[in-house]
Every structure is written in C-alpha cells, then in structure tokens.
Image (tube, rainbow, N blue to C red):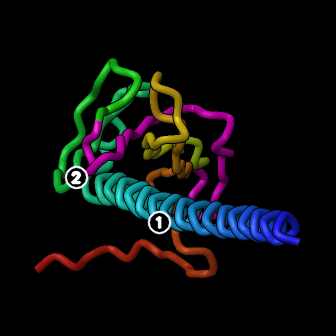
Amino acid sequence: MKGQTMIEVLVALTTMVVIISAITLSVITALRNVEYSRTQNSATRYAQEGMEFIRFLRDSNYAQFTNLTANTRYCLDKGKNSLYSTNAASCGDNVDFFSRSIVLEKNSSYCVAITPPAPTPVPLNTSIKVTVIVSWTDSKCEASGRCHEAKLVSCLSDYTIAPTPGVNVTNTPTPTP
C-alpha cells in the first residue's frame, strides 16, 4: 500500500505540473498577442500621421508636393515637419522604435486617371501614389531586420482642379472699381 500512495502522489504532481505549464503558456501567449496588437495600433497611428502630413503638404503647396522625387524613400521623423531623402533600406528608429518612411510614385497604374465632369475638361491623371510604411522589429524577427510593418497607400492629386460634383461653377467677372 505504501508504494501505491507514492505512485499516486507522483501522478498527482505530474498532472499538476502539466496543468500549470499549460496555463502559464496560455497566459504568456495572450500577453504577447496583447503587446503585438498594441504595437500594431501604434504603427498604424504613425502611418496615418505620415499620410496626413503628406496631404497637408499637398494642400498647402501642390508645386512643392509634385517636385518631390518619385521612387525615393523619404523619412519623416517624429515631431518634425519636413521630409528628408535616404538611400538606405530604412529610416532607422526615427519614430520611437519604429521606422517611418514615405515613397512617392508618379504615373502609377495603381492610381486610375479620373475625368471630372464638365466644365473641367482636364483629366486628373496627375495622381501620385503615396505609400507610408511604418516598420519595427521584435523578438519574432530574425537578426537581419524588421519583419513587421503597417502600410498605407493612397493616390493624391491636385484636388483644386475639379469642381465639387453637382455644383454649377460659373466664372463671374469681378467688377472693377
């Protein structure tokens, strides 16, 4: 009988260790998923900020916006109001531990030409494809680099060319005094 009690204790301990290990593994996995979701949300927010900066640049100075070099990686650091170009594959940790970069592509097949309604006969084929990429690394990445990214893509054009649909625009001469 003494041997059976010892075996029962060992079986009970082994069962408890397996159960506690499974619970611990589940909790660790859940915590990692929460941290990844939090990081993904931050990256998406930084990408949205980058896209808003580019829209502001387009709205405030369209000529400067169109003069940006196509197919060039631009970096937008946290808290800065200017872009700078880089030949590197990434902008480094320029937004906390994230890398935020912006790539412009002119005449992209991604951006379809739009022909506005009359009286504006000019097709809006001047769209520029804007891609904002926020990337980061964590323990799941290989040592070689960043394996996660949040990416936003949009086509921006000179919105002042076309009138608002449904609104009749007439050019009324301004009286001279």
Kindly indicate the quadrant of the structure image that contains residue 90: top left
Relative to 141, is 44 above or below? below
The residue mark sitting in front, 2 or 1, is: 1
What residue is rendered at 47% in x and 59% in y? 44
Image coordinates of residue 167 in percent, x first then y, are 56, 81
Q: Nearer the viewer, residue 42 or 9?
A: 9
Residue type (three-letter) at the residue carrying disc 1: Arg
Q: Is residue 155 visible?
A: no
Image coordinates of residue 171 in percent, x first then y, are 42, 72
What residue is rendered at 44% in x and 35% in y? 103
Labelled disc at residue 38: 1
Residue farthest left in this picture:
177
Q: Is residue 146 visible?
A: yes
Which secondary structure, mark 1? helix
Q: Main secondary structure of the magenta part?
A: loop
What residue is rendered at 35% in x and 41% in y? 99
Q: Circle 2 sits on which residue?
A: 78
Q: Nearer the viewer, residue 161 or 5?
A: 5
What residue is rendered at 45% in x and 36% in y? 104
Kindly indicate the quadrant of the structure image that contains residue 1: bottom right
Q: CA distance from mark 2 to mark 1?
A: 18 Å
Q: Which residues are magenta?
A: 93-122
Residue farthest top in this picture:
87
Determine crowd level at label 1: few under 14, some 14-19, many 20+ residues with C-alpha closer than 10 A. few
Image coordinates of residue 165 in percent, x first then y, are 61, 75
